[in-house]
Image (cartoon, rainbow, N blue to C red):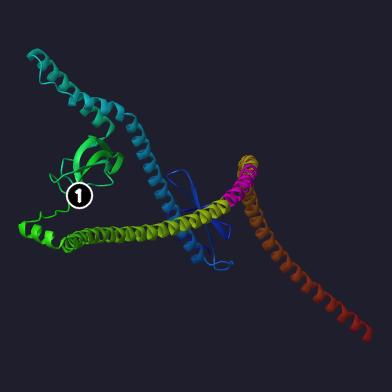
Amino acid sequence: MVRSEVTGLRPVDPENPVRVYYKEHALGIVVLALLVDSSGTAPVEEWKSRYDKLRQEFKDYIETSRRNEEIKRQELKIDSAKKLLVVADSLSRITAVYNPISCDIVKNYSENLKKNIDVIYGQLLSASGLTPIEPAAGDKFDDRMHTAIGLEYGTAYPENSVFRVIRKGYRIGDNVVRPAEVVISKRPVEVIKIKKPGLRDRILRWISPAKLRFAEVNQRMNEFERIQKEKVERLTQDITSLKDIITQLEARNKRVDELERVQKEKVERLTQDITSLKDIITQLEARNKRVDELERVQKEEIERLRRDIATLKNMIMELEAKNDKVNEFECMQEEKIEELTQDISSLRSMVIELEEKLKEQALLQSGYHEYQENAVFKNNQE
């Protein structure tokens, strides 16, 4: 017999050795599984494992679809937020304008207007889900959150840090809608300091000017070589870090390619499974049509049988009435038979009496005949 070991499934036709089980999914998609009994060509466990694998792949497909929908919603939210950035920039520029040289009335009006604009700006950010990116001076430069549009040489802030914010950036959660435009702080270029020649150097230069000029050139060359070495070391470090980043990106691209290949294989398998399921559904629809036809024929036969049963009930009632009459007739016949039995018994007794009388008469007749014969014999002898 077929073992229905798949939970939550209902058989379509219990009489068929190859049973088709189905289950309605939450999204309206029909998941099918075929189970064949031990006398069939395919084992039950194989079909069950295939069903479990297909169900897991279907769950993965649903999860991937949900993630893709979430990404699309985030992209739509970011696109709609980008359209509001012009308004946000205008409001932030208005609040940044402040004129201290004005009368008290204008100052109060400006302050109230600034407060109202700040409230509107905050409502705009909360409604669109935007969070401003406004780094402070001296913060570390983040290439994901910031965009460098200029350099500022000085020693007030660390190197490669934010010197000034030109335009705010905005983000939604971890997604950057627009990076902040900043100016980066850089160290000033080192100036080669040359010592001024003293009195001794001047005298020696006057005595041997070529030797002093050669020593001065050597000093400059050594200083230049030192600076070049430092630059080369920094460039070497930058190149090494870039190589590491490129290696990571290549490995990541390989993983992405592998994931794409796996996803394509899964999609192909799902497409094949869906095609086979469509064929099975077509067969089931044809089979359901035949079942509907059989149900219609069965209903007609049931109606005909009901009519036959009604006629049989009427006949049974008539037969019961006749049976009652027959029972009454049998009772009368039994009474008559009893009377006849009594008559027969009386007749038997009369027959017995007659037989006895006949026997007596026969004896008398036989004695009379013997007497006559004896008399005749005597007469003959005489």
- Residue at position x 88%, y 80% in the image: 373
Q: In which quarter of the image is the C terminus?
A: bottom right
Q: Which of 37 and 258 is in front in this view?
A: 258
Q: Mark 1 points at which residue?
A: 189
Q: Describe residue 199's horizontal placement relative to residue 346 as left or right.
A: left
Residue bounds of the magenta highlight: 278-297
Q: Describe residue 259's horizontal placement relative to residue 224 as left or right.
A: right
Q: Nearer the viewer, residue 259 or 338?
A: 259
| Residue 363 seen in render | yes
Secondary structure of the magenta portion, mostly? helix
Q: Quadrant of residue 166?
A: top left
Q: Nearer the viewer, residue 133 or 367?
A: 133
Residue at the bottom extreme, as displayed: 381
In the rendered image, residue 168, in percent from the top left (x then y), is placed at: 24, 35
Q: Height in image: 122 above or below 217? A: above
Q: Height in image: 39 above or below 302? A: below
Magenta residue check for 286: yes
Number of other residues with Cα within 10 Å of mark 1, as a class: few under 14, some 14 to 19, many 20 or more: few
| Residue 54 seen in render | no
Q: Height in image: 207 above or below 24? A: below
- Residue at position x 21%, y 37% in the image: 165
